[in-house]
């Protein structure tokens, strides 16, 4: 895992624009190298701002969206049309506004498509095996006030799941209680991990995630994610306020 590099932005809007530009540049570079980029999207307020900026800035970027493969880091196991679904929000903000190939967009299961979260996790694992590359090019993750990432919460049994890329999450401390998440094993397949964090309410979690020595994974899951080549922690100034 590469060492984390902190990138400070004046505010959430500046963070969203900078990350959107960087993502478009990365996608174009990967395509210029002859590969189809594989990206992992996240949910949350700042992610939605980033997604809207990507859509706004996409024209003229040189990105061929029909050659981008899209995954999610986690999802709420609810009905497909539930407004809390990360996939629905990402479609409204980005994917319905750029010419993606629907066959290359892999949403996690909903209660409409799987009987249980375990079944949904198994389906997503099979899709990753069939359509995933050796590594994700960019994984974008939010950070919870408790320092969780994806749906990997402090003290939760999902933290200990290894040997598979996905896990069903029950009794989530953040509603809804049932979810599907990538595991640490899957997140470790990222060339680049970008943590996107906005707001003073996340400042303590940021400080914990970047603490030296690294805190235990059971307490601070976010401290244990990173890309093999690049780990960037994008912060607005309020989120960075507890850092020295």
Image (cartoon, grey):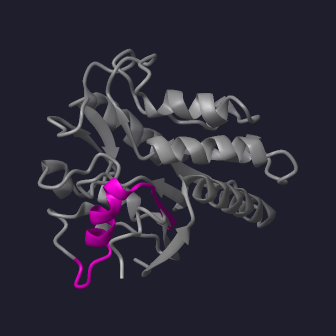
Relative side of 233 to 14, left or right: left
Relative side of 153 to 184, left or right: left
Q: Position of residue 157 (x, y in %)?
A: 13, 49
Q: Is residue 5 above or below residue 219?
A: below
Give the residue drawn at x 75%, y 65%.
Answer: 29
Q: Is residue 13 above or below residue 118?
A: below
Q: Position of residue 11 (x, y in %)?
A: 55, 58
Q: Nearer the viewer, residue 155 or 20?
A: 20
Q: In the rendered image, which quarter is residue 186 located in? A: bottom left
Q: Is residue 201 magenta?
A: yes
Confirm whether residue 130 shows in the render: no
Give the residue drawn at x 42%, y 47%.
Answer: 73
Q: Position of residue 33 (x, y in %)?
A: 77, 67
Q: Position of residue 91 (x, y in %)?
A: 59, 30
Give the residue drawn at x 23%, y 30%.
Answer: 178
Magenta residues, as a range?
Answer: 191-214
């Amino acid at each position: 895992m590469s060492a984390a590099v902190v990138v400070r932005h004046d505010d959430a809007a500046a963070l969203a624009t900078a990350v959107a530009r960087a993502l478009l540049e990365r996608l174009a570079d990967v395509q210029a190298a002859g590969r189809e980029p594989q990206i992992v999207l996240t949910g949350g307020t700042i992610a939605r701002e980033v997604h809207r900026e990507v859509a706004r800035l996409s024209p003229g970027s040189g990105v061929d969206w029909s050659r981008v493969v899209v995954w999610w880091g986690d999802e709420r196991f609810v009905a497909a049309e539930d407004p809390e679904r990360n996939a629905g929000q990402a479609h409204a903000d980005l994917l319905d506004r750029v010419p993606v190939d629907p066959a290359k967009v892999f949403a996690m299961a909903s209660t409409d498509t799987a009987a249980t979260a375990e079944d949904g996790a198994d389906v997503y694992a099979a899709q990753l095996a069939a359509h995933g590359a050796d590594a994700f090019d960019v994984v974008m993750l939010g950070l919870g006030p408790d320092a969780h990432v994806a749906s990997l919460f402090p003290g939760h049994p999902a933290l200990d799941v290894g040997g598979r890329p996905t896990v069903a999450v029950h009794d989530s401390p953040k509603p809804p209680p049932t979810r599907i998440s990538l595991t640490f094993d899957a997140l470790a397949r990222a060339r680049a991990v970008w943590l996107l964090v906005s707001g003073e309410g996340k400042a303590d979690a940021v400080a914990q995630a970047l603490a030296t020595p690294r805190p235990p994974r059971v307490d601070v899951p976010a401290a244990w994610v990173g890309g093999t080549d690049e780990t960037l922690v994008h912060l607005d100034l309020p989120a960075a306020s507890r850092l020295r």
